[in-house]
Structures are given as C-alpha cells and as structure tokens.
Amino acid sequence: MSEAVASPTLLFVDDEPGILSALRRLFRPHGYRIFIAESGAAGLQILEKETIDLVISDMRMPEMDGATFLKQVRSRWPQVMRVLLTGYADITSTVAAINEGEIYRYVAKPWDDNEIVSIVREATARQRLESENRRLTALTQAQNEELKALNASLEQKVAERTAELRQALSFVEQSHGELKKAFLTSVQVFAGVIELRSGPVGSLTAGHGRRVAEQARSVAKRIGLPDAEVQNIMLAGLLHDIGKLGLPDELLGKAYNTLSGEQRAMVMKHPVIGQNILMGIEKFKDAALLVRHHHECYDGSGYPDRLAGIAIPQGARILSVVNEYDSLQIGTLVQRPLKASEALSFLIENRGKRYDPVAVDAFVKLISETQKPATSELPLRTMHLKPGMTLSRDLTHRDGYMLLAKGSALTSEIIGQLIRMEQAEQQTLTLYIRQEEK
C-alpha cells in the first residue's frame, strides 16, 4: 500500500497581523499546514526549522523587504515555491523580486480569493512534481551506482587492460585502410569485452567470436552471398555474444544443457539484448538482426522468436551452424566438450532439423577442404623469435585474454612489442611456432 501524501505546508510573511489572519482563514479549509511570520527574519527562522513547500511574502516590510527575503529563500531553499504579495504599484521593487527572488507569481492586494487559492494550488502541485522528479533522479543515480558496484570486477578488468587491448587491435589495423581501421577497431573492442572475464571463463571464451566470424564469413562466400551480406555476417559473428555482458561468470562457464530453467531464461535473453545494444549504431543495424536470430533453429525450436526455415535470416542460419560447432568443442553447449570430428557429426545428424541443410553442407565442405597437413610445433621464448614465424596456438595473457590468434604471422614490430611487455610486466612468454612436417 502506498503512503499517503502529506498536505503541502505554507508560510505567510507580512508585517500586518490582519493580512496574516485573512490568509490563514482563507487557506485553512483547504487542508494546508500553515505557518505565519511578521517579518523576513522570523520567516527565515521558520524555514530553518520546518519543511516549507510555498512562501507568500509581502513586498513592503520593515528591516527586510520582500525582495530581499525571497532572494534569501531562493538561495538557501531553492525548492520552495515563492509568491509575492503587495498592495503597492512599485515597479522597481517588483522587478527586483522577480529577478533576484525568481518568484513563481505576483499577486496584488486586494487579492481575489479564488485566484490566489488557484495560484497556490498550481504552485504546490508544480513543487510536488519537481520534488518527485528530484527523488526519481536521485533514485536512478543510486541504482546506477549499485549497477556499477555489481559490475566492478568487469569494469576494473576493462580499465586495467585497455592499453593491452588497443595493442592487440593494432595488429589487425595494419592490414586495413584508415577508414576501415577506425570501424574495425570499434568492432574488435566490442567483441573482446565479453572475453575479458577472469578465471577459467576468460580462457574458455577467448577467441570464440573471432573463430565464428571467420568461419561464418567463409561459408557465406562459399554460398555466394553478396559482399555486403558477407560483411554483416562477419560483424554479427564477432558481436553475437555481446548481449552476455550482463551475465554472471558462473552462467558463462556452464554448458547450456546443464542450466536450470531460471538460468536458461536469463541466457535466452542475450540475443535480444545484443540486438538492442547494436541497433543504435547505424552500421550495425543489419548485423543486429542476425545477432537477434543466431539461436533460432531450422525446425522452429530455437529462440527468441521461434522462427523456422527460410523465415530465419540466411546469415543467422549460417551463424547458428558455425557458432554451435565452436560451442560444442569448448563445452558451452553440452557438458562434455566434443572433438572437432564429433562436433561435425552432430551438425550432420541435425541437418534439416536444428540446422539449415544448405549452411551445413557448405560448412562441411569448408572444413574438409581447409584441413591442413599434419604439423608439429616448437615452443620458443621471445628472444628466439624471428619475423615470418607462424603461431600454432593462440597466445593468451596470464589474465585470460588473447594477445595473438593462432595462425598469426610474426613481424619485427610484434616481436618487439612482446619483448617490451615481458619487461614491463615481468612475465615470461612462451610462443608455440608452427613447424611443417616434411
């Protein structure tokens, strides 16, 4: 049950007792709490002790006139509504009261009872609205602070690793033009935020968005989609899990099929949240639609909208196949992480059911054609690295986020940056270098 709203409190200030009595008789039947003062100084003393909603002050008073009094009220209690009451046609004093006291209304003596009652009613209503607005603003600020506290660990991680993230993104920027640099940097920042999670969760998800984006783009090209659609699919692949930013680490670290009903309901919101995050950016609008539908299933059993068949955007159908192929292997879809061959068999078994047959067929061909000859790897310290060497594993920072992706080719600049990072952070980096078997 909501609490009853207290009656507004009025303060009448006038050096004439008869005026004060008349005002009190007029307003008492309307349910107001009323205080009276015969001078500005007395009025200020009441304001210091009581919570006043509206002041009606006479202009001409000894020692402190109405303009001076209302100016002090505005300065010390700005939330109090102020009304000027005078029987003198003193333009100079009235202008001073309006300018310095910022009064709500000016009422001339003798007043019209109905008019002054209406003015006070409107003024107190406005004062209550302004007070409620201040309360709601303060409440919103407090809730924002609570939200910041809940996400403090993530925010701290982002703040601490901004420099390292920019350094990692610079490796991508080297192969693109100036315009693409700025755009793709923003995309990579968004994509990397979800992977900046501490502990095993960060290691689990590191590189997931990049792998999904690269393979989805390859499938889209293989199917023959236009370049613009291929670009949107790649962007959606990078950002498909951006809606998981608000999820706790324990949910991100569990396989989907082990979650409780309540936990699943929380996870199932992330595609819509992801779309909402991206919709405000013009270049992401098309990709945002794919993010919304990347968990839809071909047979209509997916979420959030339970679309089926060709009602699901083609890019989302491709993302569903590639995303779940990777998720099956890292253990975020089923409890036991599957081998690559087992994950591929799962896709084939659910072809035409859970997944779009065209997308599955194209992906299976892609995997079979891109399988590389057996390779060995050689662990090396940074001082033994040479330009042109290729990583056989992802290079991950000790805090769980990825520095270099598997398959990255080393350059003199990259090697120098890695050596400086070792020196600055006093850590030893070991890189696994691909060695082709002959």
Image: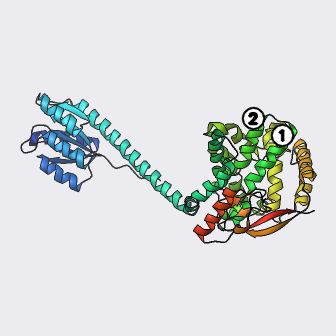
Q: Residue at 43%, 49% (x, y): give it.
A: 136
Q: Which residue is mark 2?
A: 228
Q: Which residue is mark 1?
A: 221
The image quadrant that residue 264 belongs to is bottom right
Is 435 above or below relative to 58?
below
Q: Is residue 69 visible?
A: yes
Q: Looking at the image, which is closer to me, 397 or 142?
A: 397
122 displayed left or right of 314: left
Q: Looking at the image, which is closer to me, 319 or 65?
A: 319
The image quadrant that residue 155 belongs to is bottom right
SS under mark 1? helix
Is 28 above or below relative to 255?
above
Q: Earlier in the sequence, mark 2 or mark 1?
A: 1
Which x, y percent locates residue 144? 49, 54
Which x, y percent locates residue 139? 45, 53
Q: Looking at the image, which is closer to me, 298 or 148?
A: 148
The image quadrant that residue 282 belongs to is top right
SS under mark 2? helix
Local crowd at mark 1 within 10 Å, few (<14), some, or many (≥20)? some
308 displayed left or right of 246: right
Q: Looking at the image, which is closer to me, 405 or 365?
A: 405
Q: Which mark is residue 94?
A: none
345 displayed left or right of 94: right
Q: Quadrant of the C terminus?
A: bottom right
As shown in the figure, which amino acid type bears the numbered disc 2?
Answer: Ala
Q: Is residue 302 visible?
A: no
Q: Residue at 79%, 41% (x, y): give it.
A: 315
